[in-house]
Amino acid sequence: MKLMMKLQACGAAVLATALLGWSVPALSQAVEGKQYTLLNPPQTPEIAGKTEVIEFFSYGCPHCWHFSPLIDKWVTEMPPNAVLVRIPVSLGRPQWGQLSRAFYALQATGDLKRLDHELFDAIHKEQQPLFDESNITAWAVAHGVDAKQFKDAFNSFAVTTKATHAEQLARNYQVDGIPKIVIAGKYVVQGSTLEEYLDNAKKTVATLAPAAGAKGSK
């Protein structure tokens, strides 16, 4: 992703600044080559009737950690026809693959919303080595997750299927750096900083994706 090339190595602490509103008059038009590029070939969104906004991320990525509170606020401001889909990916790193399974396991136990930021913080703020099943399970249990439910989910066919599908989506969407946002299966957001990246994503949704969403984003 262009963002990762410009931000250099993971680890730079980029904090949020003021976020712009969603009204179209307040936003300049999104322009191909500036706010976004086109994915070739485009992909068919998996959510019908909505403008699908995919965020590819990993709990192991510092930039994703810094971006997380920004995107959480963005969700509350999205137009009603847009929906965010978070896809955890490994980028070929086995340890990050375990974190992808943790995402889907917490989703299965109903603890994802409660522990999403805590897992980011445990890895990047507290420097906990949560990169294998044993350590991840111990951490989850210490944070109130039922041990058996988590272990069963972590090793379940359903979680394996979702994690495998996430990796396939990463290949289909040509993910080479994260965080990466793709809108309506074809608009790949660009930006030099996390704040600019978010702003460009908002502009793209506001100016391009509503029309695509109305057509089913094929």
Image (tube, grey):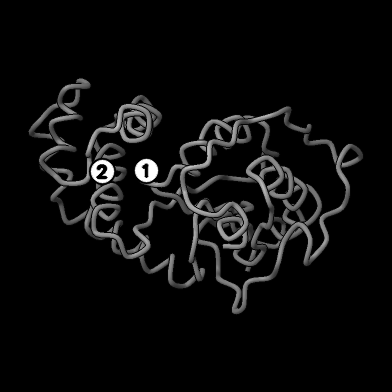
Q: Amino acid at mark 1?
A: Tyr
Q: Which residue is found at the position 86% from the left and 42% from the top?
A: 27
- Secondary structure beneath label 1: loop
Q: Quadrant of residue 73?
A: top right
Q: Label 1: which residue?
A: 59
Q: Amino acid at mark 2?
A: Ala
Q: Which residue is found at the position 69% from the left and 29% from the top?
A: 17
Q: Quadrant of residue 1?
A: bottom right
Q: Going by the image, does 153 lie left or right of 41?
A: left
Q: Which residue is found at the position 74% from the left and 53% from the top?
A: 204
Q: Going by the image, does 165 lie left or right of 194?
A: left
| Mark 2 or 1, closer to the camera | 1
Q: Quadrant of the C terminus?
A: bottom right
158 lies above or below 218: above
**What numbered label is drawn on residue 184?**
none
Give coordinates of residue 6: x percent, y percent. 62, 57
Pointers 2 and 1 in contact (C-beta within 8 Å):
yes
**What numbered label is drawn on residue 102?**
2
